[in-house]
Image: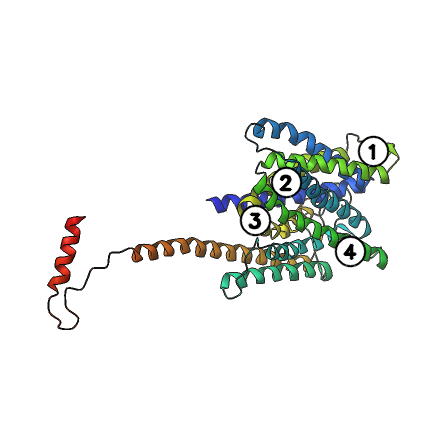
Amino acid sequence: MADMKLYLTIILIRTIYAGMNMFAQAAFSGGMDTFVFAFYRQASATIFLTPIAIIFERKRAPQLSFKILCKMFALAGCGLTFCFELYNVSVKYTSATVAAATMNTIPVTTFVLAALLGLESVQLKDMSGITKLLGVAFCLVGAMAIAFYQGPLLKSFNHHHLLGHKTGVTDDHGSFSTTTWAKGCLLMVLGNIGWSIWLVMQGAILKQYPSKLLFTAFQCFFSAIQTFFIALSFERDFTRWKLGLDVRLLSVAYCGIIVTGVSFYLQSWCIERAGPVILAMSTPLTLLITMGSLSFVFGETIPLGSIIGGVLMVGGLYSVIWGRSKEHVHSSRLPMSREDGKEKSQIKQIPSPLNEETKTPNFDSFDSECQRDQKV
């Protein structure tokens, strides 16, 4: 039951991220600056989370030291500010499809980092460890298939675009120059590495400060400060900072409250219980849900390569889940076998009733045992 709750939470997180892709793309298509968008997103998340965290965790929160506060500030800069800014800029330089596809390399980098830090075990002589490595390989091959193999376009069941125009998520990057496209890919790779570090380091800080709501609220607050100064340095025209009652305001509210506020808390909950790798391995689900939503809701056509890559990545995800479940079963049996060994070693050795040399009844040893029992 606990595993089912964990997996359902992961699916919910990926569904929220799929909605983020579509809302963010709609905001950028409406002319919103990417740096200003990042600031509004983090500011709205801070305003939403802070009172909730204070109400529910103020009394039972552990003492917050200056050292942990500095770690949170650095973690927010690496995982939230750094990654969000690079991701938004890379979408401008390439396309949202390429960005979404390259994000699926996060499981590979996260797995390597977690293994190097000793947070994830890999037993190459065990079937579970081999299955986990194969799962990572399937995810990598699936991401490459989506990025580099298009194939024939599969027609959508919905032939009418909901917004009256294409969202641009499935646009080709052919209109961009090779240099610009290479810059975008490099920025996306750097952002993915930063995101992997953020996923791995969260587990270590949560052990020192287990209040997940306050932990998330502090990260959003620090990231809001960081993104404000970044947006101020890149966008001095404050007329572009204005939000109206349009899709830009809706995108900021969704990405700030639902994505940053709700999903980040859920991510902290999942990392605390299952570690960072299983959460990173679920990244392909976001792309699959996004493609399905674009096809059925917006009428977008989906390349065959995306379908093939999606199948490979889902197969890789389930391979890692299977490997982890086998490891948990094996580790749960080890303490039982050790206890059995201790009990066997503590069993009282009863002397043999026969003399080893003459094979006759050994009355001396029997009498000595009886006398010892009477004394006790």
Q: Which residue is mark 4?
A: 186
Q: Earlier in the sequence, mark 3 or mark 4?
A: 4
**Label 1 sits on what residue type?**
Trp
Q: Which residue is at the front of the view, 368 or 95?
A: 368
Report helix, strand or loop for mark 3.
loop
| Amino acid type at mark 4 | Leu
Q: Tally the marks.
A: 4
Q: Which amino acid type corresponds to the residue marked 3 in the rendered image?
A: Gly
Closer mark to the observer between disc 1 and disc 2: 2
Choose mark 3 or mark 4, whichever is in front: 3
Is residue 30 in view from this perspective?
A: no
Q: Which residue is mark 3?
A: 275
Side (left or right) of 127 relative to 230: left
Give the residue pinned by disc 2: 264
Residues 201 and 296: in front is 201
Real-space Cα distance between discs 2 and 3? 14 Å
**Mark 3 surroundings: few (<14), some (14-19) or many (≥20) residues within 10 A:** many
